[in-house]
Image (spheres, rainbow, N blue to C red):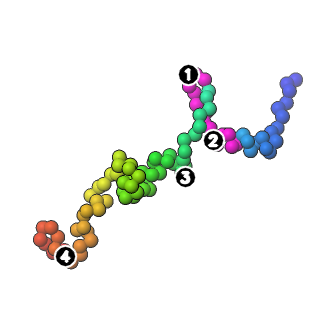
Amino acid sequence: MAKQKKKLSPDQKAAKKKTQMKYITVFINGKQKRVKRPDTINGMDADEFIRRNADPLWIHQNEMWEYIDLTENDDIFLFDEFDEGENSKDGKER
């Protein structure tokens, strides 16, 4: 008859869970290796979180210019949408 496995104590369970949250198991050259998990914020990668939530001014201040993606709607130099009642560029009144 095979030997029964001993149950883990609460301290051992907590240590095991902490280790699993800190590391991820990957295969490298056919062998399992433990590698640190990438940093996440709300379940997202840190770079993805910054891309989704940072405004262009913060991105510029932190020298992350490759993430600045200004579209026509986000362009800070377009004031036509705020000029109500004034003449627009083509001379017609709105």
Which amino acid, mark 1? Answer: Asn
Identity of the residue drawn at 58% across and 31% down: 26
Q: What element carries label 2?
A: helix
| Disc 1 packing (10 Å; few <14; some 14–19; many ≥20) | few
The C terminus appears in which quarter of the rendering? bottom left
Position above or below: 32 against 84:
above
Residue at mark 2 = 22
Separation of residues labelled 2 and 3 (CA atoms):
15 Å
Report the side of 71 relative to 46 (left or right): left
Residue 21 within the segment the image draws in magenta: yes
Report the side of 93 relative to 61 (left or right): left
Separation of residues labelled 3 and 1 (CA atoms):
32 Å
Identity of the residue drawn at 16% across and 74% down: 87
Separation of residues labelled 2 and 1 (CA atoms):
22 Å
Which amino acid, mark 4? Answer: Glu
Separation of residues labelled 3 and 4 (CA atoms):
45 Å
| Disc 2 packing (10 Å; few <14; some 14–19; many ≥20) | some
Position above or below: 1 against 51:
above
The stretch in magenta equals 17-31
Residue at mark 3 = 42
Residue at mark 1 = 29
Residue at mark 4 = 86
Q: Which of marks 3 and 4 is nearer the N terminus?
A: 3
Q: Earlier in the sequence, mark 3 or mark 1?
A: 1
Separation of residues labelled 1 and 4 (CA atoms):
68 Å
Identity of the residue drawn at 27% across and 58% down: 72
Which amino acid, mark 2? Answer: Lys
Label 2 vs label 3, nearer the camera: 2
Q: What element carries label 4?
A: loop
Q: Percent x, y for residue 56?
A: 36, 57
Q: Which of marks 4 and 2 is nearer the N terminus?
A: 2
